[in-house]
Amino acid sequence: MIKVLLADDQRLVRAGFRSILDDEEDITVVGEAGDGEQAVRASRELRPDVVLMDIRMPGMDGLEAARRILGDHQLDQVKVVILTTFDIDDYVYAALRAGASGFLLKDTEPEELIHAVRVAARGDALISPSVTRRLIAEFAARVRAPEPGPRLGALTEREREVMRLVAAGLTNDEIAARLVLSPATAKTHVSRIMTKLDVRDRSQLVVLAYESGLVSPGWLAG
């Protein structure tokens, strides 16, 4: 059972999401929060698998709440999905850098919401990969010139290849098919890369791929 915490200052939004998610046999909404402080407190008390986090809330906003949750080693299993009314938003990029699993537009279809929760819970891929990739690429184009630095030097050529495909939004199964590997081998590669680079989530891996120059803005896996 996937446990979900809803963090949004609008009751109607929370009620709508709860209605959609609670209808699923494998998903249950375990709590709600109306601001960032409540979201952090509820995450520590309820230990949800996924927090659907609105960015703009009174008091502590969703970005700061995401940082605190994702920076708490006792909450390592908690995934945060950012909710936004905009598909291009500075806050969203900052949240991805903090380790959020991705973002979701508030007007998304019910099926996409359900899929996003399941994907985030298993930590398999970013939410809406094509849109998230465009978002990251746009903001990566604004940062200073990439500096590869020593971190990527720890990766083998195969691991760099896998990291590029992760940056393209591919799942482990898709990476396996692209490189003619078993899904288990692809998953092992991704896990080793994250361990070597000391990143918490695939989203941080994607951001690092752009910021280090391993991939460039506008790059797509052919």
Image (cartoon, helix red, strand yellow):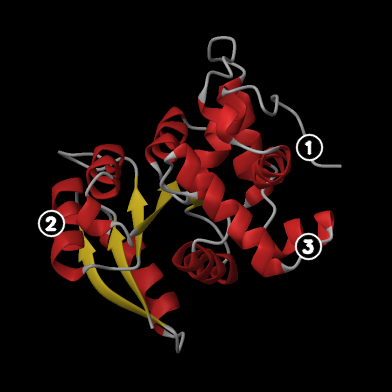
| Type of the residue with mark 2 | Arg
Say which residue appears at 64% left-offset and 39% top-offset: 133
Is residue 35 shown above or below 133? below
Percent coordinates x, y for residue 172 in the rendering: 66, 61
Q: What SS does tag 3 mark? A: loop
In the rendered image, the vertical position of residue 12 relative to residue 98, given as above or below: below
Residue under label 2: 41
Q: Amino acid at mark 1?
A: Leu
Q: Quadrant of the C terminus?
A: top right
Q: Secondary structure at mark 2?
A: helix
> Can residue 87 be spotted in the picture?
no
Q: CA distance from mark 2 to mark 1?
A: 39 Å
> Residue 16 placed where, x, y %?
39, 69
Front residue of this view, candidates 164 and 13:
164
Residue indicated by mark 3: 181
Residue sitting farthest toward the top: 145
What's the CA distance linking mark 3 and mark 2? 42 Å
Q: Residue at x 60, y 32 (%)?
A: 209
Q: Give amino acid for label 3.
A: Leu
- Viewer-side label of 2, 1: 1
Question: Which one is earlier in the sequence, the residue at label 1 or at label 3?
Answer: 3
Mark 1 Cα shell of 10 Å, populated few (<14), some (14-19), many (≥20): some
